[in-house]
Image (cartoon, rainbow, N blue to C red):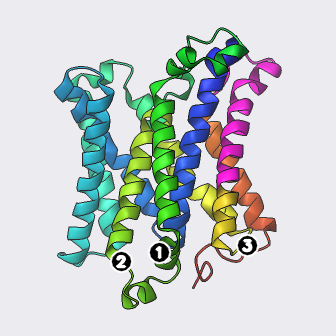
Amino acid sequence: MTFLAIDLPAVLAGALAALVCALVGNVLVLRRQALLGDAISHVVLPGLVAGFWISGAASLVAMLSGALIAALLAVALIAVFRNVGRVNGDAATGVVFTAFFAAGILFLSVSGAGSTNFDIHTVLFGNLEGNLWVAAEGWGSLLDPVALVELPDSIGRLAAVLAIVLAAGALAFKEIRLVAFDPIYARASGAPYRLVAGGIVVLTALAAVAAFEAVGAILVVAMFVCPAATARCLTDRFGTQIALSAAIAVTAAVAGYVLAAFVPLTLGFERSVNAAGVIVVTAGLLQLAAMLFGAKRKGYGPRGAFA
């Protein structure tokens, strides 16, 4: 009962968040846009707080809508800085995401949201342990539609975003692969480059928004990068890389949660530790192992790390 009510929903939320971010992260890593995932995971904060403030309560629809608007606005500003201001892409991204995140922290202080359970700790580390399944009454609940409806809302949102990412990947797999590996040829060949590139940005924003509320900014950033970069050290085939990154993301999420929730208690400590932090550490250790011993460890980009 305790496992079903407390641990299972947290593991599901963590695994789904890691999986969604990892799938999108494959393209970001190959396009050398890993910082974009980092930026979007930070710029959603003012949108979340604005949604809370406008709705007058912790309305999930309002907060997530505000986060998505903030993410798309930030992406548009980055494009303006790059194309109009002729600012380097990394510099433009860094300026926009730090400014948005700082504005979000300020807005959090003056809006009253910081006095609720939506505080700076939740912003950074999420509320993975707060995903509770109060309707669970036994293993039979896993087959009970009424009980399943009572699963935390974050799990349903993450599952819906995962379905969108998988559908988009299946429909445009060839175009995404072409844009990821050879954007110059993609432009010259008549492929819908701008449409695919824009779609990648939208999927990144959607993944960041869905995962941010459940697991916080730190886990979102790590899962955009670590599973894809780890898989890239193990294979140079795009399809295999995607499959490996998905397996790595889920492994890091499950193993990290188990290490955080159960190992400290087993060793005699009074409390468990933050699950999101341990998941990130686990993902980082997997990447370190792949970088040291992986068959393709010389590079993680389409033509190698230093191409």
Place residue 9 in its image quadrant: top right
Query: How many numbered circles are shown?
Result: 3
What is the number of the mark on residue 192?
Answer: 2
Q: Which residue is mark 1?
A: 175
Residue 62 against residue 294 in the figure, above or below: above
Reading the image, the residue beneath label 3 is 297
Q: Nearer the viewer, mark 3 or mark 2?
A: 2
Task: Residue 26 in the image: state x and y as whole percent.
Answer: 56, 63
Residue sitting nearer the eye, 164 or 129: 164
Residue 121 image point, x, y percent: 44, 29
Mark 1–mark 3 Cα distance, whole angstroms, equals 26 Å
> Please, what secondary structure does the residue beneath circle 2 have?
loop
User: Residue at (65%, 40%) from the top-left corner?
Assistant: 253
**Nearest to the observer: residue 190 or residue 253:** 190
Q: What amino acid is found at the position of numbered circle 2 in the picture?
A: Pro
Q: Earlier in the sequence, mark 3 or mark 2?
A: 2
Foreground disc of the pair 1, 3: 1
* Magenta segment boundaries in residue numbering: 246-273
The amino acid beneath tag 3 is: Arg
Q: Secondary structure at mark 1?
A: helix
